[in-house]
Image (cartoon, grey):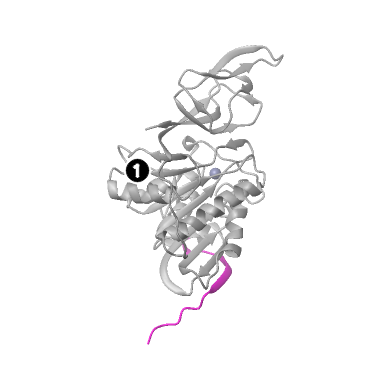
Amino acid sequence: MTDEIQAGVTRSTLEPQALRRFAYACPSIEIQGANAGPRLCIMAGVHINEASSIVAAMQLPDLIDPQRLRGRVSIIPAVSTHHLYTKAMVTPPSSGVDLHWSYPGAPDGEFNDALAHWLVSDWAQDAEVFLDLHGGDLDERMARYVVTQRTGDEAFDTSVSHLAGCFETDLNVALAPPESWSAGRICTALARNRRHGIVVEAGDHGHLDPDSVDWITNGVLKVLRHLDMLPGDVDPRTDQTILGRYEWVVAPVAGVVRLAVAPAERVTQGDRIGIMTDLFGRPVADVRAAASGHIMMLKTPLFAQAGEWIGAIASEV
Ligand SMILES: [Zn+2]
């Protein structure tokens, strides 16, 4: 006698025991397929203003028929519920306050570390693949791209690149194998243990953009077909540009930022990609590309202090 699988969609609020001391709770959507199979975990809203990725996660249950699904899709559409109404924005990794750079975390750590640990090692413990959906904080314009972590283990790295190829973009930031593993993005923490993870980026400045929503959900559906969790052929792209290094563009002086490049644009090291002006609009410094590669992100605020992030470039391997 075999257990009958009850296919369907369940929505609930998770209150993890491990995060009780922080009174943390988050929304959970479980799509249980009619047949046994792997589990895909998807989260969005680590950065709470990244509207297109959050709405994409919320729309997935409308696009996945449990009767045709093999396995289970688990979704947390808004992870950072503690920031729902704070408008908290992305901060640099060095700030130490942003969940996005906190993985794999630690069970006994402060809030971000404990939440990171729960996501990777508890909630998604048995996930075949983990997708972390992002894109376009209130002050950002983004190229559409994916971030993965290479390990040097060719078979593993190739299987991750096939997953990345399910997303319709030329740009795959496949981070170079680290010399030593330290806290970072979720794809890095997962790859360290040969687990498959992808950070997906699409959207602009907190705006809900239907094209970005479709781009994300189409990629997720392709991942499901690639994992044979949904029927249908998929031919992952194998022609993505592999970008191994991510460099921040910083303001050379304090003042007004006037960038003259667009997301996804190719630049060469030393190119003038914009200028800084004083408060009268007079040019005071050039902004030069610190590396050759593609513009992945541009910050939108007009004013920046010297040394502040105003964009990011990812370089070819
Ligand atoms: Zn983000």
**Residue 272: image location, x then y, percent:** 54, 17
Placement of the C terminus among the 4 image quadrants: top left
Quadrant housing residue 59: bottom right
**Residue 183: image location, x then y, percent:** 40, 43
Figure quadrant, ligand 1: top right
Q: Residue placed at 47% from the left, 17% from the top?
A: 270
Judging depth in this view, the residue of 59 and 252 nearest the camera is 59
Q: Is residue 188 visible?
A: yes
Q: Amino acid at mark 1?
A: Arg
**Residue 295: image location, x then y, percent:** 52, 31
Compared to 35, does 151 lie above or below?
A: above
Residue behind mark 1: 150
Q: Is residue 219 magenta?
A: no
Query: Among all residues in the image, which is located at the extreme right?
Result: 280
What segment carries the magenta color? Answer: 1-18
Placement of the N terminus among the 4 image quadrants: bottom left
Apparent side of residue 266 relative to residue 260 in the rendered image (left or right): left
Q: Is residue 189 visible?
A: no
